[in-house]
Image (cartoon, rainbow, N blue to C red):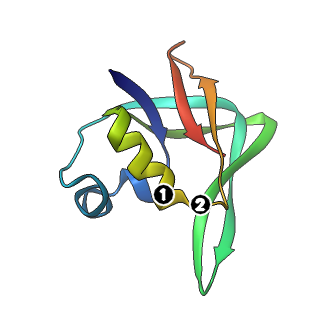
């Protein structure tokens, strides 16, 4: 079974995808209304996160992953993020890390 995953930060990076999934997953551009980019510090590094903001939107990519790849993404995102179902501007339903 395939799952749609909206990525807007490090998971858009082909090098990170190669490291996590063992391949690069081509995506299509999409947008999430009602959210804005913000940053979170984990250890010494800063990462993008998205937070609710009714006046903003976040551009990213929609990628298709298997259930196993989704689990790999869960492990990569750590407990600093949680996976939630969202509806994108394209009206497609997908998972996103918030």
Q: Height in image: 80 above or below 73? A: below
Q: Residues within 10 Å of mark 2 (few under 14, many from 20)?
A: few
Residue 4 horizontal/vertical position (percent): 42, 27
Mark sitting earlier along the chain (1/2): 2
Q: Is residue 2 visible?
A: yes
Residue 20 horizontal/vertical position (percent): 31, 58
Q: Where residue 75 is drawn, which disc sits there?
A: 1
Q: Secondary structure at mark 1?
A: helix
Q: Residues within 10 Å of mark 1 (few under 14, many from 20)?
A: few
Give whichever of 69, 31 is nearer the camera: 69
Q: Secondary structure at mark 2?
A: strand
Q: Check the picture and name the quadrant holding the N terminus.
A: top left
Which residue is most to the top?
91
Q: Is residue 9 visible?
A: no
Q: Is residue 88 left or right of residue 38?
A: left
Q: Where residue 48 is drawn, which disc sits there?
A: 2
């Amino acid at each position: 079974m395939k799952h749609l995953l909206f990525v807007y930060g490090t998971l858009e990076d082909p090098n990170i995808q190669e490291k996590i999934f063992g391949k690069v997953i081509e995506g299509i551009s999409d947008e999430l209304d009602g959210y804005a980019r913000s940053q979170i510090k984990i250890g010494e590094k800063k990462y993008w996160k998205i937070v609710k903001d009714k006046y903003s939107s976040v551009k990213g990519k929609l990628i298709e992953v298997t259930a196993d790849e989704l689990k790999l993404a869960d492990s990569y995102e750590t407990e600093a993020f949680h996976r939630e179902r969202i509806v994108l501007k394209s009206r497609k339903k997908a998972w996103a890390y918030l």
